[in-house]
Image (spheres, grey):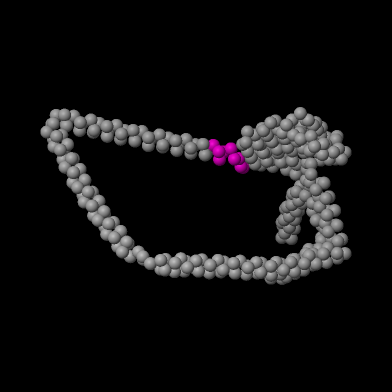
Amino acid sequence: MILGILGTILKIIGMILLCILFLLLFILFLLLFVPLRYRAQLFREGKNIAVHAQISYLFHLICLPVDFEDKKLKISLKVFGFTFFSNTESEGGKRKAAKKGKKKVSDKEDEKESEGQEEGEEQEIGEAEAKEHPILGTVQIKEKPIEENQVKQKQNSNETNETKSKEGEEISIKKSKPHSISAKIAKKLRILYKKLVVIYQKIRRRIKNIFEKISSGKEKLADLRKKMQLIFTFLRDEQNKNGIKYAGKSILQLLKYVLPYKIEGELVFATGDAYSMGRALSYLGMLYPLYGKQLTLTADFEADAFRLEGRMQLAGRIRFCRILWIAFKLWRKGKILTLVSSAKELKHKLTTSAL
């Protein structure tokens, strides 16, 4: 009995573990082989640009729509139909806060208007009291000219003192002036000597700086030659050459896979110049086999300025298993690892030579 119970418990535990394992494998399969899809629609007319894009994953269970129109960007993240993020909600909160601030400002302005009304009423009351009691008004008016006379007297006394002090200074200056011509000549010679000394020092400093720059330039040229020799030796090595070629091929494969597989649209373009327009058409003619079946380009020769208008649609998908496979091939062959190690050595040598 006990052994049968233990067996059934172990069977249940094993089934649970197998279900968890199959669930993890299923999730891993979805992550690796289900593609990340992206679509975009671009419209341009004059200076108005509109973009409607969408990134989806796991059969649109995870969706990220992006809209740009009228110079406004709208982004939202949806998972299983529920929005987890949206910048439109934050804009609504900002608008509410701005409305609250406007209300507070209007309340403050009302308070200031009420205070101004109270002050005007107080002034009217004071004027009425002055009319009822004319004696008090005449007393206040008489006090003001007395004070003004006192202030004018003080200013006149200050001006007389200043004129006296200035006259005394002028007399002292006239007494201190040298009347001899020899003293004037000696002063001028001293000033000229000081100027010549300053000019000589400046010329000497500039010459010294020029020689220092020449010597530092020679050192920099020698350091640059050493660095160029190290770089050329790095590029001439066969292992490094093979690593660079293989890395370039793998990057091109990755770009081909990541770039959109579908591009459709109609574009009207103009450069505003006949010469540049001819060059652009010659380059586009060389690339016609790549876009001719998908894009229709029309040239506007009558436009006086740069123009690019029209619509374009693109779509693409990315599978993470392909990216991992390209990375695995790079790691397995070991060419990229040797290239990275030699690049680190080159960087170390360049830094040590700079020091």
Closer to the camera in the image, 276 or 168:
168
Q: Quadrant of the N terminus?
A: bottom right
Q: Position of residue 126 (x, y in %)?
A: 20, 33
Closer to the camera in the image, 316 or 227:
227
Q: Position of residue 167 (x, y in %)?
A: 27, 57
Is residue 250 shown left or right of residue 103? right
Q: Residue furthest front?
A: 181
Can residue 57 be seen in the rendering of this structure? yes
Is residue 140 shown left or right of residue 119? left
> Is residue 218 a member of the stretch shown in magenta?
no
**Span highlighted in magenta in the image:** 82-92
Q: Quadrant of the C terminus?
A: bottom right
Which residue is at a point 18% across and 40% down the rendered structure image?
144
Which residue is at a point 22% across and 48% down the rendered structure image?
156
Can residue 82 be seen in the rendering of this structure? no
- The number of discs equals 0
- The answer to which quarter of the image holds residue 43 is top right
Which residue is at a point 70% across and 38% down the rendered structure image?
53
33 lies above or below 338 = above
Which residue is at a point 87% across and 61% down the rendered structure image?
242
Closer to the camera in the image, 189 or 232:
189
Is residue 138 shown left or right of residue 260? left
- The answer to which quarter of the image holds residue 236 is bottom right
Q: Position of residue 233 (x, y in %)?
A: 83, 66
